[in-house]
Image (cartoon, rainbow, N blue to C red):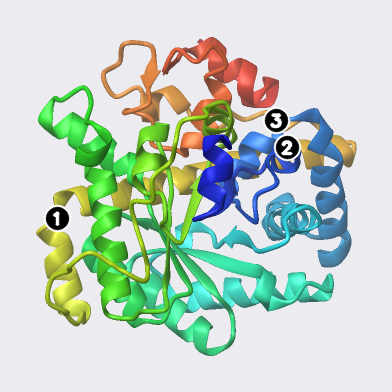
Amino acid sequence: MANLLDQLAAMTVVVADTGDIDAIRRFTPRDATTNPSLILAAAQIPAYQELIDRSLRESRQAIGAAAGADAVVSEALDEISVIFGKEILKIVPGRVSTEVDARLSYDSEATVAKAHKLINLYEQAGIGRDRVLIKIASTWEGIRAAERLERDGIHCNLTLLFGFAQAVACAEAGATLISPFVGRILDWYKKSTGRDSYPGPEDPGVISVTRIFNYFKTYGYRTEVMGASFRNIDEIIELAGCDLLTISPALMEELRNSNAELVRKLNSSEPAASEERISINQASFQAMMAADPMASDKLEEGIRGFSKAIETLEAQLAHRLAELEGGAAFSHAVHEIFLLNDLDGDGCITREEWLGSDAVFDALDTDNDGRLVPADVRGGLGAPLALTT
C-alpha cells in the first residue's frame, strides 16, 4: 500500500509550508507557501546566505548609494520574498504564495500597492501571474484589497483565517484561495477549555474547515480551501479530500513513514449538507467576528506574530547589510523576545505563549521539547539577535 503522503496527494493538492528549498525538493509538492516567518527560519540556514546577500546588493543598487539602511532593507524584503519564490518555482510545478507585509493588514490601499509591486517583480523575472498567489490577512480591509486585486488578474491567498465570517466574505469577494489555520484554532480551544487533546473528528480546527469546505461546495463558490497550520497528522487525515493542504516538512515526513489506509473525508462533488446561504457586508462581518472570540483573538495574535517576524527579519538584514558594506555591526538590541512572549515570566516560552509563526518556533525548538529557553533563541537566531540574559 502507498504511504499516507502519496495517498493524500492522490485526492488533495499537497503544498509545502516552508521556505526551506531543500525540503521542497525532498517532498516534491505541487505548490509551496512562504511568509516572512518561514523566510526568517530559512535564513538561518547557511546555504541560503547567498540569496540574502544578493537581494541586499541588488536593493542597494536599485535605490542608490545615498539611501539609508532602513530604505535598503525595506526594498530588500520584497526582493527576498520574490527571490525565494523564484527559487521555489524552479522546483514546484504549480504556484508559490508570497505574503504582503502583515503590518498593512488594515490598509487596503497599501496592500493593493504592495501586491502590485510583488507581482511586477515576478513579471520582471519572467514569471506569470498564474504561478503566484499574493497572501493577505483576512481582515475586512484585506478582503476588500483582494477583491480589487482579483479583478486586476492578481490571484490571492487569504491567510490568518479562523472564522466562518472571514471565509464567506473571502468567497463573496472572489478570492482564489483561503487558508484556515487548523492548529491555531485547536490551540485556542485547548487553552479555553483546559482540555489536553481532541480526537481528530472532534478537533475544532477540523470541524471549522469541514464546515467551510461543505458550504463553499454546496453553493458553488470557486474559492479553494487550503487547510493550514497543522499540529498533528490526525488533523490532516480528517481533512483528506480538501482542495489543498499546506503541510510542514516534519508532518510530511511523518505521513510518508506511515502505510495506514487513508479514507477520503471531504468530497467537492458530494458535499455534506450545509446551512442556509448568507451574505456578508461590513456590519455583519464585524458582528460575526465580535461574536466569535476565537477568530477575533487569533486574527489579532496572528497579525502581531507575523509583524514581529518581519521586524526580526528586518533587523537581521540591517546587520548583514552593515557587514557587506563594511560598516559597524548592527549593535542595538533587537526585540526583547522573552519580554514579548514569556507571558508568565517563568523563563521559557511555550508554543501557546509564542506569538510568532509556528515555523519559527519549530526552527528554534531544536530539541523538540515544546519550549524555548534563552539558549534556544541565541542558538537559532544567531549572535546578532542574541538576548542578553
Q: Depth check: 330 or 367 in front?
A: 367
Q: Which residue is drawn at 53% across and 77% down?
A: 112
Q: Position of residue 121 (x, y in %)?
A: 75, 70
Residue ID at (75%, 58%): 89
Q: What's the CA distance linking mark 1 and mark 2?
A: 39 Å
Q: Pointers 3 and 1 in contact (CB under 8 A)?
A: no
Answer with left or right where residue 278 lies relative to residue 35. Answer: left
Looking at the picture, tell me which residue is in the foreground, 69 or 13.
13
Whether residue 155 sits left or right of residue 202 in the image: it is: right
Query: For the residue marked with disc 1, what is the amino acid?
Result: Asp
Q: In this view, does 55 lie to the left or right of 174?
A: right
Q: Can residue 387 be seen in this view?
A: no
Q: Residue 292 carries which label?
A: 1
| Label 1: which secondary element | loop
Q: Please name the amino acid that badge 2 sits on.
A: Arg
Measured along the vertical axis of the image, is residue 370 above or below residue 170?
Answer: above
Mark seen at residue 44: 3
Residue type for callout 3: Gln
Q: Which SS class for mark 3?
A: loop
